[in-house]
Each structure stands twice: as C-alpha cells, then as structure tokens.
Image (cartoon, grey):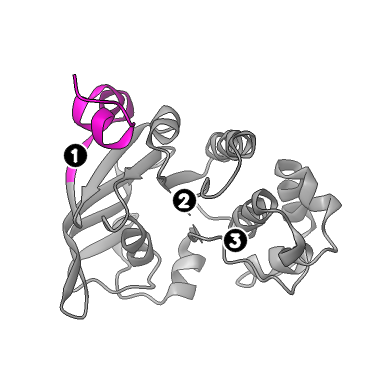
Amino acid sequence: MTAMLRLGGVDVRYGAIPALRGVDIEVREGEIVALLGANGAGKTTTLRTISGLVRPAKGYVALDGKRIDQVSPHRIVALGIGHVPEGRRIFPRMTVLENLEIGAYRRRGDLRSDLQHIFGLFPILEQRREQNGGTLSGGEQQMLAIGRALMSRPQLLLLDEPSMGLAPLVVEAIFDIIERIRDEGTTILLVEQNAAQALQLADRGYVLENGSVVMADDAEALLGDERVRVAYLGEGAA
C-alpha cells in the first residue's frame, strides 16, 4: 500500500541541539499509527515537523508523494493535515462554537453539516456551544481540540497526547472516538504516553529514543516485545 505520509531521513535541530536524527516514518491511508517514546524522545517535534511548525535541517516530509517540508503551516492544513497539539491549546475566552468555526478558517460556505458531525461525535459540545472554552473540563477541552481539527476535514489527523491529564473513564471515551474517526475515513498518527492503550488501538507503531526510530513493527508485535513491555508498559523484566 502506498504511504499517505512519509518522513525520510529527517533531522531537526533546536540551535546546536539535535532533536530528530534520520527519522524514517510512513503512515498509510486508513491506519492508526502510534508514535511511542519517553519524554524528550522527539515525538512532539515529529508532529510539529509534519505540520510545518518546525523545518527539518535534513531529509523530507511528503504527503501523497509531494514534499511539504517547505510549505507553510496554514497551507499544510489546506492540503489535508489536522493537528491536535499537546495541551489542547483551545482559545479559552472564545465560545465552543467560535473555537470550532476557527478550525474551518480555510474553508468557505455553510458549516452546519460539519458542526452537526462534530456534535454527533461529542454531544457535550453541543450542550456547551455558547460556553467559553476555558470553562470546560479537561476532557471537554480535549474533545473541543479534536473537533476543531476535524472542522478542516483532514485526511490525516495528528494527535499529540490526547489522554494527558484525563481521568480513566474520559480516556476510554476519547480513545473510542479516535477509533470512530478512523472508521469514518480519517488516517491518524497518534503520539501517546499510554503505550498499552495506544498499541491496542493502532495498526502499527514506531518507538523513538533520543530523536531516532529504534523500533518499528505491527502494533501486536510491539505489544508482545519484551523491550517495549519493560520500557513503556510498566512490566518488570523476566
């Protein structure tokens, strides 16, 4: 299957500090791909590089076979990549409805069908539509951040730590929605500290350490790998 997204030999530096080293990743249409690793491994930098917020010093990022590593972030959104950043980054003084409408800023025309789709995924957002985003709970803000990204109708959704700081029942609901989004036709690249839950949901996964890909395999194989179980699933070595 042809890759929708491909990163080839990507190096990223923050000044003199290397953040990514020779990263090769591909995401195929219809997949959920998990990107795992400890804090500081380069996961968020990888997503920021894909969405144009960081420029690679070396290598390339390609969407549907065309390089996008020198394309502006707003143009990358228009090309079909949505990004839900770590920490959600909603606009706290704007209403839920205004936050969602901002997600469709690159588009023209009637947004009612898109809003109804988001409210179908997240009914609580319809109930809160006139509330300011800053008054929502953490889980509701995460739903709003995902909904805002979906308003651009992305073909590829980048999700950065969607379970961070959320209660277990809310996390379960968020992961159910992520699976539903994929089933509706959106490909997903998922950065997630909860490695077990991410791999149970994903088709394939990559493990980053110190800015380099050190493992890549089917999700089931990674779940069964002793190194992954010890390092990321909290299981002791046998």
Q: Nearer the viewer, mark 1 or mark 2?
A: 2
* Secondary element at tag 3: loop
Question: Residue at (85%, 51%) from the top-left corner?
Answer: 127
* Secondary element at tag 1: strand
Q: Which residue is mark 2?
A: 161
Q: Are marks 3 and 1 in contact (CB under 8 Å)?
A: no
Q: In this image, 115 relative to 62: left or right?
A: right
Question: Residue at (29%, 42%) from the top-left corner?
Answer: 2
Q: Which residue is mark 3?
A: 152
Q: Where is residue 224, by image quadrant?
A: top left
Question: Residue at (60%, 72%) from the top-left corner?
Answer: 106
Alpha-carbon distance for marks 2 and 3? 20 Å
Amino acid type assigned to the residue bearing label 2 in the image: Glu
Is residue 15 one of those drawn in magenta?
no
Q: In this image, 8 relative to 112: left or right?
A: left
Q: For the magenta stretch, what is the residue range?
A: 214-238
Numbered circles on residues, count: 3
Q: Which mark is residue 215?
A: 1
Badge 3: how crowded within 10 Å, few (<14), some, or many (20+)? many
